[in-house]
Image: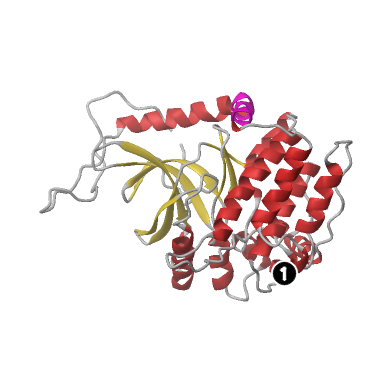
Amino acid sequence: MLRDANGTPLPQRFGPYVLFDRIGQGGMAEIFLGRTFTRLGAPRLVAVKRILAHLSADERFGKMLIAEAKLSAPLRHTNIVQVYDLGRIDGQLHIDMEYVEGLDLHRLLRLCTRRRIPFPPRYVFFLLEEACRGLAHAHRATADDGRPLHIVHRDLSPTNVLVSFEGEVKLCDFGIARAAAETLPPDETVAETETLRGKFAYMSPEQARGDAVDQRADIFGFGILAWELLAGRRLYKGRHEIETLRLAQQAAVPPLPRRGHPWEDAAQTLLDRALARRPADRFPDADALHDAIRDIVLGFDIHCSQLEFAEFLRTHFAEEILPLRRERERALDWIAPPRLSRGPGGDGPPNGIERRSPRPTPPTL
């Protein structure tokens, strides 16, 4: 039986949502797949990121997290996970997001390694170009009055790059690393710091030193992603978190391994600039980085469509992941839509879960 971090079985009620699958967990939050209902009774799937209880109880962290989420929520782009709602339910902070049916990049690469499935360069460049489009959109975002929002992701690690079985590539969790970094007490242990402040292995040197950062820190983090995808291995291999942090501060990046591809010199030139130690020596913005990726794709005739990428993902991974998720979702059919509290206007928020009866015992989750 599936359970949350507190040991409570799934499915479970969380405000207007019925949570029925835990699809992610980290040092800051659990992510659940949930179902909610429109006022017309139509079901809708949503990903619910529920912040762990000890962090939800930190008032300063909560204010910062909500401020950052509000800053990023208006982002509308096909390569960015849409934020629907944020707030507290029963004292726990939550962020409700678009559900992307697929894998995060970390899990995808692990599955490829475990099953010895090659991840061809054409998919790498497709993924990088799509992800960079989303990053560029966030970096260009402005307020209603035209002021630049200066959004910086700060945590462009593989777990924050999602790929769907439709071949979509989406970035998630904008600004959450900043909320943690701005509110952690200075005496936190290294292990706790690592789980909350972004992954050390994907930090720019200035971020790893604790200096002020701007959007060029994201250029460096994106460069690490690109290096690892093209090299087929991790960049920083610290034996523990302190060593990984030290490697990130030093930012000593080796050249790409040579495998005889015609685009390798161009890719190395791109990486040298994206991974420059001094921010002033990097690409000035994500648009310029995207253009450099696009030049390689066009210049070396590297073809990959979204449909082709989707076919690769479905062929190798969908049959393992989707049937179990579908079974868990079907189990929710044994749970009726929440009743609506009827106020003076004739509508209101859901106030309970009604189980249909009589029926045979539903499948065990």
Instruction: Count how many numbered circles sit on residues in the image.
Output: 1
Foreground: 219 or 188? 219
73 sits left or right of 216 in the view = left
Give how far across and how far down residue 140 sits, in percent: 56, 59
Within-10-Å neighbours for mark 1: few <14, some 14–19, many 20+ = many
Snapshot quadrant of residue 202? bottom right
Snapshot quadrant of residue 70? bottom left
Snapshot quadrant of residue 302? top right
Return the residue found at the far bottom. 186
- Give, as a single range, the part of the protein colored magenta: 307-316
Foreground: 136 or 53? 136
Give how far across and how far down residue 247 sits, in percent: 80, 62
The amino acid at mark 1 is Glu
Return the residue found at the far left. 344
Q: At numbered mark 1, what does the secondary structure look like: helix, strand or loop? A: helix
**Residue at left offset 72%, top offset 57%:** 201
316 sits left or right of 240 in the view = left
